[in-house]
């Protein structure tokens, strides 16, 4: 990067008539005449943006300034690149999904996403340092950082058993968390719905969360229950952050199950009350009334004790199978199932791809079985026994989605990953989250002002994890930039046809290099590993 003088910056910002000699030095890229959003929730300005190397070096009038590449972006929004603070970019079998299989991350770039933070829901790779090194040697098109997963740490040390950790095991888990933080993790994530993380008490999680405090880390949690147990789960999440002395984030915040619909105002009031007494609490959310996770989410927790083989043994026992079925029926009626087998769609059954895209009602009809909740519960047990499936659960109300999004502490995150067209039927959030907010929630439905939405996608998540040179468009910041048409941008992915890229993003720069130019992927992979310690 060339060193640009203060005089140059002042000239560009304030239009001084006498320009120093350095003004005539060519810079790499000038974005001409765009509507520039700085990442704060404030009015944009019409200005040119100059990029040199990986930095923004000037914002102002660059009409006469030489540049290697000038791009007319008149009428387009020029914003900081979007930061997805809850990403499954590293999720699952590398032969089927994720950043190592599809490093171009086209589904993200075409939404304007330039950075993803992985390791959510208590699930992260271990050791984190090895994966970061691998990504540094094989860069993607987007930047990548991660949390350390409480569930992964517990699984590594304690295993899959539903029991308290011993004092020795707790110290080993603390050491694993410190090791991850030394490698640059941004904090501790938990998925207290999922085994084995769900087997931990709040006190155990607090002890691990305390380990991230010296590093400036946060606690981000998929709560134990987002349905009938929502309020207790919010209070638990707030307590963990408060007693550990670190910020707490309620991730993919939602209200699940018809009995709870409309009660997001009560949920948000708990957050507001904690903030009022000085607790640092924030929220992230995706803009859909459906979730996506595996079939075990509807199994009673006790049935998952001991892992997959132990669950199969329980399902082979008629008495225990009947008890498991009772728990699944309860979840289907009151929580994720929306009291209708058609509300649960199969996204990915790796052992039988012909099931992908069918809902439970479809499968029951194919097998000539009556469509009802009881038979759906039996089917769920059979599917899990055969190898399991990831699913899409339609069990939320848009009233709650809108209300949570409008909360001043809510930022936007996908809870999706890196996907490409294929025979899976994933949640459309993988392709559409950020474009959907800008197109539907901002332009069409006016749920949010554009400046507020951009703030929730950029500066808010950056500040939440203390990234001070991304998520903002200002001189000296890293040149992660999304250029889009506010009148065009929209998601195209649907639940029926999710493999459709968003439209309306014209250019995307990652670390100053174009990953998308004139709506075309460049093939460049300028993404970097980003660490909390800046190394």
Image (spheres, rainbow, N blue to C red):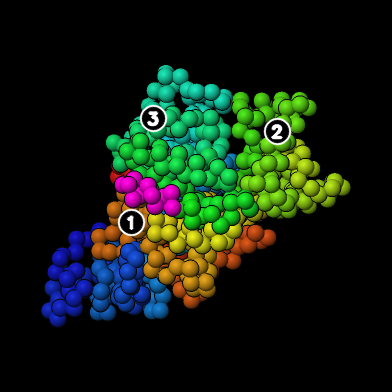
Evaluate whether residue 11 shows in this view.
Answer: yes
Q: Residue 481: x, y in percent? A: 38, 63
Q: Residue at x 43, y 49 (%)?
A: 270
Q: Is residue 43 magenta?
A: no
Whichever of labels 1 and 2 marks the residue nearer the N terminus, that label is 2
For residue 470, the mark is 1
Which structural element holds mark 3? helix
Instruction: Say whether disc 3 or disc 1 marks the residue closer to the N-terminus.
Output: 3
Label 3 – label 1 distance at C-alpha: 31 Å
Give above or below for 471 relative to 294: below
Q: Position of residue 111 (x, y in %)?
A: 49, 63
Between 284 and 238, the one lying in front of the other is 238
**Crowdedness near tag 1: few (<14), some (14–19) or many (≥20) residues, C-alpha within 10 Å:** many
Neighbour class for label 3 at 10 Å: few (<14), some, many (≥20)? some
Mark 2 lies on residue: 324
Task: Provide residue 427's location: percent of width, then percent of height.
Answer: 61, 54
Secondary structure, mark 2, is helix
Q: Quadrant of the C terminus?
A: top left
Q: What's the residue at 48%, 68% (across, down)? A: 447
Q: Is residue 270 above or below residue 181?
A: below
Query: In this figure, which residue is indicated by the disc labeled 3?
Result: 207
Give the residues in magenta.
269-283
- Residue at image location 50% in from the left, 41% down from the top: 232
């Amino acid at each position: 990067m060339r060193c640009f003088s203060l005089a140059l910056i002042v000239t560009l910002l304030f239009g001084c008539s006498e320009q120093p000699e350095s003004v005539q030095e060519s810079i790499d890229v000038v974005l001409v005449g765009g509507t520039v959003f700085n990442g704060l929730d404030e009015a944009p300005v019409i200005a040119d943006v100059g990029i040199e190397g990986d930095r923004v070096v000037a914002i102002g009038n660059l009409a006469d300034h030489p540049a290697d590449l000038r791009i007319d972006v008149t009428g387009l929004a020029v914003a900081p690149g979007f930061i997805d603070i809850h990403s499954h970019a590293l999720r699952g079998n590398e032969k089927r999904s994720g950043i190592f299989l599809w490093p171009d991350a086209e589904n993200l770039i075409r939404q304007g996403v330039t950075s993803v933070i992985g390791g959510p829901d208590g699930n992260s790779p271990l050791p984190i340092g090895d994966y970061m090194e691998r990504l540094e040697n094989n860069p993607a098109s987007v930047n990548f950082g991660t949390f350390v997963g409480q569930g992964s740490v517990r699984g590594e040390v304690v295993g899959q058993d539903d029991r308290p950790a011993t004092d020795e095991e707790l110290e080993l888990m603390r050491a694993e968390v410190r090791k991850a933080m030394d490698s640059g993790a941004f904090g501790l994530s938990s998925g207290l719905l999922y085994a084995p993380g769900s087997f931990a008490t709040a006190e155990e999680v607090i002890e691990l969360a305390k380990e991230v405090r010296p590093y400036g880390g946060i606690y981000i949690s998929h709560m134990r229950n987002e349905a009938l147990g929502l309020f207790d789960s919010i209070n638990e999440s707030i307590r963990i952050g408060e007693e550990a002395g670190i910020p707490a984030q309620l991730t993919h915040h939602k209200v699940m199950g018809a009995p709870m619909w409309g009660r997001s105002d009560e949920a948000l009031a708990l957050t507001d009350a904690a903030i009022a007494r000085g607790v640092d609490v924030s929220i992230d959310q995706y803009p859909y009334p459906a979730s996506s996770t595996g079939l075990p989410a509807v199994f009673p927790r006790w049935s998952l004790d001991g892992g997959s083989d132990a669950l199969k043994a329980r399902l082979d026992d008629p008495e225990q199978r009947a008890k498991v079925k009772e728990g699944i029926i309860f979840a289907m009626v009151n929580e994720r199932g929306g009291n209708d087998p058609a509300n649960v769609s199969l996204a990915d059954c790796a052992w039988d791809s012909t099931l992908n895209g069918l809902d439970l009602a479809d499968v029951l009809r194919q097998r000539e079985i009556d469509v009802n909740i009881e038979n759906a519960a039996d089917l769920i047990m059979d599917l899990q026994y055969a190898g399991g499936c990831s699913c899409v659960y339609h069990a939320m109300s848009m009233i709650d989605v809108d209300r949570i999004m409008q909360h001043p502490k809510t930022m936007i995150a996908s809870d999706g990953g890196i996907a490409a067209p294929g025979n899976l039927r994933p949640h459309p959030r993988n392709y559409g989250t950020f474009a959907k907010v800008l197109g539907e929630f901002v332009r069409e439905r006016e749920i949010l002002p554009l400046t507020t939405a951009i703030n929730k996608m950029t500066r808010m998540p950056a500040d939440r994890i203390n990234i001070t040179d991304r998520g903002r468009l200002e001189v000296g910041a890293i040149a992660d930039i999304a250029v889009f048409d506010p009148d065009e941008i929209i998601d195209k992915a649907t639940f029926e046809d999710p493999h459709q890229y968003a439209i309306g993003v014209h250019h995307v720069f990652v670390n100053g290099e174009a990953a998308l130019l004139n709506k075309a992927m460049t093939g460049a992979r300028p993404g970097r590993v980003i660490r909390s310690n800046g190394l």
